[in-house]
Each structure stands twice: as structure tokens, then as C-alpha cells.
Amino acid sequence: MRFLTFSGRTAKEILRDPLNLGFGLGFPLILLFILSMIQANIPVTLFAIEHLTPGITVFGLSFMMLFSALLVAKDRESSFLQRLYTTPMRSRDFILGYLTPILLMAAAQGLLCYLAAFFLGLPITASVFSAVLFLCLPALFFISFGLCCGCVLNSRQAGGLCGALMTNVTALFSGVWFDLDLVGGWLKKIAEFLPFLHAVELERAVLLGDFASAFPHLYWVAGYTAVAFVVAVFLFLRQMRR
Amino acid sequence: MEAIKTIGLTKKYKDVTAVDRLDLTVQSGELFSLLGVNGAGKSTLIQMLCCLTKPSAGDAFLNGISVSSDPSGVKRMIGISPQETAVAPNLTVRENLELMGGAYGFSRTKKKEKAEALAETFGLTGIYGKKAGKLSGGWQRRLSLALALIGEPKILFLDEPTLGLDVLARCELWEMIGSLKGKITVVLTTHYMEEAEELSDRIGVLKDGRLLALGTAGELKAKTGQDQFEKAFIQIVKEGESCDS
């Protein structure tokens, strides 16, 4: 089980970096608390906890994308991957070794967000566990997208694209911070073509236990995830066999 | 016995020929150095021999196994220390060594034993629990060499193993590389003439992907009529240039 050995390394490499812990796990929780405090002090409903928490869990996934992009890019730059390519490890060991631990981190991050939301008034029901389970699908999209970036960009470019650009794109087009129906126009149209809004709506529907409403969004997210995963595998194999 | 044999080995990138119809033989247990200026094709040659890149034409055989038709077979018998230190920075020295053992599919006990034995050999026991990314360049190079050996390779590739090291660290690493002579086949690329002269059984000089000269340091000096190896190298490369023009 060489992929397990490599998974352990991936997890250690990410979790031992305090910046990763701060951004990946800490930042979404801080946002959750700040926005809940804002909600408590304004007369209109902007950040209701059952509406906000699913959005924060999806937004938090953008950091998982950053982790996967940076790790792969750095491993390429430092020739660490080159060294491992001369061992009997196979391509699936590498791909699973990167994906699995980050996917577990994404699920753990989601669970932590829901636990924190419990202290802010979110009732904990069986739907929370379904929401964490369904979060794995957009998580796979974000991680795969990060893998794609890590395969073709250097660490500086990957950090810029995934860390600065994509986190903002996720925030802007996901409907986490504001209701896209209120904005309407081209912003809403673009958002409807991207997976971020659908991922948030999927999470919101699952958290409410309204699986019927989840399905149109599930198709979008599943489609994007499938494409991102296939492209990630293709790009990884291409740089491996170059 | 022939450890490495290349036959018309060629690598082309679009219109650039990095390695050009190379015929080369390295014997078992030999320490063979590849010299050349930047862009000579040294690293590309090593990458082909390590199955990191596919030849455009020709083939190479490592202990009789083809890099083109059986890369998995080749990978079971080689180790590489790349130009960069290629360590996992947030893992400790022990974890780096055990990770590499895991990559070769060793059991937990064997990984531990091999890691401890190599740490002892390379003087890494004092920093066994330290993160690799926190080590100095010299210690990282030592670790890199130990990592290359954990799979018990029959053929070891060292791509500029002392690049960027101070004189003392370089000498220490030379001793370690020298101690491998005769035990396994070592192919070394370097820009340091004294390193090649000190360590190598034979030296090959590459330019524009072609082998310009081959022999012991003494033979190359005698061939060029130079008393210093560096001068001999420069003459070989310059004569190669004049042949090209």
C-alpha cells in the first residue's frame, strides 16, 4: 500500500505548516464567528447560521485547492517527485496519495465548521453528517483543480492563482457573502455556469434535508468534479511521463 | 559485466537534440563521471537512464534491462540523487528515509532498520529527529545521498551532488561517494573538475549531446598533452567546438 505511505507524507507536509493550519482551518471558523456576530447586531437577516455555514464550508474548500496546488508544484520544483518517480511507485499511488489526505482534511474542516456553528445556534441533526458527506464532492473538485495547477505552474504562480484569484472567484460567485438574486445580471448568469454557487446551494439543501432541491445542483457539481478530476489525472500523468 | 550500455541513445526536444546517438558502456562497480558545460546533455542522459524521460531513438540497457521496454524493471535497481536536494522539508530525517523505504514497498521493520543503518553510515543520527527543511545544504545533500541508497540500488545516479556546498562539506561528501566505489555502479555528473578527477574510474566529456572524449583522467590529460585536468577538459570542449564549426 504505497499510496498510504505517500498519503501520510502529504498529510504531515500540510499539517505541520502553521500557515496552512491558520488559513485552512482557522480562517473559515473566524469568518463564521465574525459574520454571526454581525448578524446578531443587524435588524435584517443576512447571515442566518443555517444559510451561512454551508457557504463557509464550501468557501473553506478553496484553501484545500491551494494546499494541493502548492504541494504538487513544490514537489515538482524540488525534484522530490522526480526522485520518487525512479522508485516502483505507480501513478495511482501519487494521485491517491495527494487526493486522499486532503479530502479527509476537507471533511474534517467541514465537520469543524458545523460543530462551531452548533455553538452559534445551528441545530445538530443527521443532516449535518449528510452535509459533510456531500461536501466531499465539491472538495474533490477543488482538490483536483489544485492538482491541475500544481502540475503546470510553479509554486509562485500556483500560489497566486489558487491563493489569491480562485479564493476570490469562489467568494464572488458562490453567493456566500451576498444573495446573487439581489445582484442579478451578468454576475448571476456567470455564477450559474460555474460550480461554486451550485456547491453552496447543494450544501444548503442537504443541510435542510431537502434532497429534492439538491439534485439540479448535484449534477452541476458532479459534472465539474468529473471534468476536473479527469484533467488532473491527465496533467499529472503527462508531467510524470515527460 | 556491463552495468550500463547505450546504443544510439537520442533525445530530441522539438528542434533541439539534447542527446545525440550516444553509444556508451559503463562497467559494474565503476564510478563513471559525466562532464560537460551547461546544456551538454548530462542531466537529460541521466533522466533517460532513470526512466524519467523516454528516448526519442535508440535504447539503454541497465544490467541488461531496457529503459524503453521495461522501465519498472530498471526502477527496481536504481537510485538517484537529483540536482536539487529533493527532500520532504516538513518531514524529519527519519521520516524522509522511511518514506523512501515505503516507496520501495519495504515492511515497517525493514524501513526502520534501513533508515537507522543509513543514518549511522552518513552520520545523520544526531539530526535524526530534525525536519529536513531546517538542515543546512551540506546535511541535506548527505540526506539526499542516503535517500538514494535506501532502495539498495545496483546503479546509483548522482546529478551534481556537491552543487553549492562549501569546500569542507564537499570533501566530506566525496569521502562518502568514494566509499561506494566497487560496491555499486555510480554515474556522477559534475561541473567540478577536481571532483571528477578525484573520484572517477573513467570520465566522459559531453558537448551538445555527443560524447567528445572518454577515458581515465590520466588518459584524457595525456591525450590532450595537458598537465592539469581542467585544461584538458577545456581543450577537449574547444576542439569539439572547432570540429562543429
Image: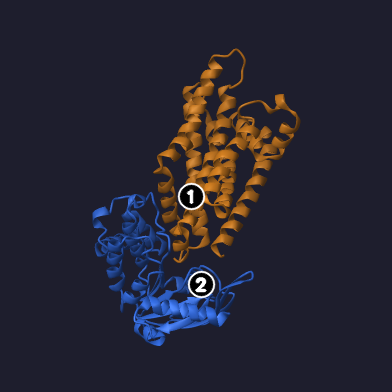
Chain colours: A orange, B blue
**Pointer 1 chain:** A
Report crowding for label 1: few under 14, some 14 to 19, many 20 or more residues within 10 A (C-alpha): many
Question: Which residue is rendered at x = 55% and y = 23% of the image?
Answer: A49
In the picture, measured across the screen, residue B209 lies left or right of residue B85, that is: right
Q: State which quarter of the image contains the N terminus of chain B.
A: bottom left
Q: Which residue is mark 2?
A: B41
Q: CA distance from mark 2 to mark 1?
A: 29 Å
Residue A74 in picture, x, y percent from top left: 48, 52
Question: Which residue is rendered at x = 54% and y = 18% of the image?
Answer: A38
B101 up-or-down from B21: above or below: above
State whether residue B116 appears in this view: yes
Q: Which mark is residue A71?
A: 1
The residue tagged with tag 2: helix, strand or loop?
A: loop
Quadrant in the picture for residue A48? top right
Residue B81 in picture, x, y percent from top left: 40, 65
**Pointer 2 chain:** B
Q: State which quarter of the image contains the C terminus of chain B.
A: bottom right
The residue tagged with tag 1: helix, strand or loop?
A: helix
Q: Residue furthest top?
A: A43
Discs 2/1, front: 2
Q: How many marks?
A: 2
Question: Which residue is rendered at x = 33% and y = 64% of the image?
Answer: B146
State whether residue A133 appears in this view: no
In the picture, measured across the screen, residue A69 lies left or right of residue A197, that is: left
Amino acid at circle 2: Gly
Residue B230 in picture, x, y percent from top left: 38, 75
Q: Are marks 2 and 1 on the same chain?
A: no
Residue B153 in picture, x, y percent from top left: 37, 72
Amino acid at circle 1: Leu
Q: Which mark is residue A157?
A: none
Quadrant in the picture for residue B138? bottom left
